[in-house]
Amino acid sequence: MTGTPGENRPESGDAGGQEQPRQPLKDELKSSLAWLEHAALAGGDLVRLAALELRLAAADSGKLVGLALAMVPLLLLAWIGLSVLLGWLVFAWSGSVAWGIVMFIIVQLAALGIMAINCKKYSKSLSFPATSRQLKTLKEEASGPQEADKSDSRTG
């Protein structure tokens, strides 16, 4: 026994009596550190999951492109079949092969017309109309005070 009895027990007037509040602080720091470690592990798992899903999505996108390419001939055949059906119905109704062929051509031209209208509509967005208007407004605002100064200097 090398120490005096009661040496480790701080009394109310000792400076060592302040050690008691440090224990909850240490526990809080330990729990915060444990939470951060858990969050880091969960974040790492999330990154790995996202990487695996990205690889899966890349593989599936290739399959989607392949299926879309396989669908193109089927869509073309379905369109031709519908056009032939309409031409055949006109032929059956009128009894004239020429009117049946005209109906087939009209269906094709109607589809081309709709596509041309849509191409014209979508090509307008390729010119960035909203950006062009904003840029024009900015140019007018920037040149506005300069033009006003020039007109004031000419009149004065």
Image (spheres, rainbow, N blue to C red):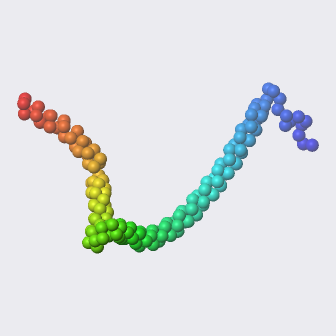
Q: Residue at x 17, y 38 (%)?
A: 146
User: Residue 56, relative to residue 10: is it above or below?
Assistant: below
Quarter of the image for residue 110 reads bottom left
Q: Position of residue 28 (x, y in %)?
A: 71, 40
User: Residue 27, relative to residue 120: is it above or below?
Assistant: above
Is residue 72 at all visible to an observer of this figure? no
Is residue 125 at all visible to an observer of this figure? yes
Q: Residue at x 76, y 35 (%)?
A: 19
The N terminus, quarter of image: top right
- In the image, farthest residue toward the left: 155
Question: In the image, is 57 to the left or to the right of 150?
Answer: right
- In the image, farthest residue toward the right: 1
Towards the viewer: 127 or 124: 124
- In the image, farthest residue toward the top: 13
Towards the viewer: 67 or 4: 67
Q: Residue at x 30, y 59 (%)?
A: 114
Question: In the image, is 100 to the left or to the right of 57?
Answer: left
Quarter of the image for residue 69 reads bottom left
Q: Position of residue 136 (x, y in %)?
A: 23, 45
User: Residue 2, relative to residue 38: is it above or below?
Assistant: above
Q: Position of residue 61 (x, y in %)?
A: 49, 66
Q: Residue at x 39, y 70 (%)?
A: 81
Quarter of the image for residue 84 reads bottom left
